[in-house]
Amino acid sequence: MRNSPIGIFDSGIGGLTVAHALKEKLPNESIIYFGDTEHLPYGEKSDEAIQNFSKNIAEFLERKNCKAIVIACNSASSVAFDIVKKTVKNIPVFNVIDPVVREVANKCNSCKIGVIGTKATIQSGVYTKKIQKICSTAKVSAMATPLLVPMIEEGFVNEEISHKIIANYLSNKSLANIDSLILACTHYPLIYNEINNFYGGKVQLIDSADIVANFIFLQLEKMNLISKNKNPKYQFYVSNYTKSFAKSAKFFFQEEIEIEEVNIWN
């Protein structure tokens, strides 16, 4: 069980930021990654659709004998976390929201926190509720930024068009005078530098990947599930294979990877 793989899923390439952070933090762990590219982006789907997709993927990862499952997608973490836990009752399930909320809220005292994410994540209100439950004096301004995921998936990064879209969103008055900004989508680290440049480095950007990886490391350690495997394997699956996804995935994971298309919906 200890040497079984960690299963990670997202709607596309965004969750690879979490997968890569886990690889760095836990170098002996095997990883199985599933990108649901057929249904990308999750943020535009209904709660019921996201829950159904997540349930199917969790069952796929359970069949692959994963020892833990990481929902590396804020939209799915927002609306499908409980469904996934019920689906795979004997496997620990982690989301990308709770570790970030704890990290931010415990350091906050009457600060103003900005949150950007998909429509599904922002409409759920999950970040505002969870942060204010821990720190009631925190002011949270959450805004949906739905163009960012398709922009990133299509490779429009660090270009004139991405600069304009990012500036248009971040100039919104609801995000004025924030102390920190939670990048509440695992795709957003790829535009970290562009966002940081917009703010001139004066706003603290909260990138979930390392926070989530550190949290999972501690939890697996408590459960005595840290692998001792010296030859970990990395397997990558998608529901719809495209060359652009493969190119982006290799850049995102920062090494050559082989991707297999599978149909888990029948």
Image (cartoon, grey):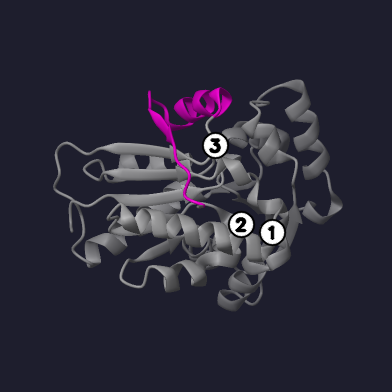
Under mark 3, the amino acid is: Asn
Q: Secondary structure at mark 1?
A: helix
Q: Is residue 36 visible?
A: yes
Q: Give the side of residue 263 with respect to residue 165, left or right.
A: left
The disc labelled 1 sits on which kind of residue? Ala
Residue under label 2, please give it. Answer: 75
Which badge, 1 or 2, comes first in the chain's sequence?
2
- How many labels sit on residues? 3
**Badge 3 is on which residue?**
240
The reply to whether the C-beta atoms of the residues labelled 3 and 2 are less than 8 Å apart is no
Mark closer to the observer (3, 2): 3
- Is there CB contact under 8 Å for labels 1 and 2? yes
Q: Foreground: 47 or 72?
A: 47
Q: Is residue 118 visible?
A: no
Residue 100 lies in magenta, yes or no? no
- Secondary structure of residue under mark 3: loop
Crowd class of label 2 (few under 14; some 14 to 19; many from 20; radius 10 Å):
many
Say which mark, if any, is on residue 120. Answer: 1
> How dense is the environment of label 1, judged by Cα within 10 Å: few (below 14), some, or many (20 and up)?
many
Image quadrant where residue 231 sits = top left
Quarter of the rendering occupied by the N terminus: bottom left
Which residue reaches farthest right? 173
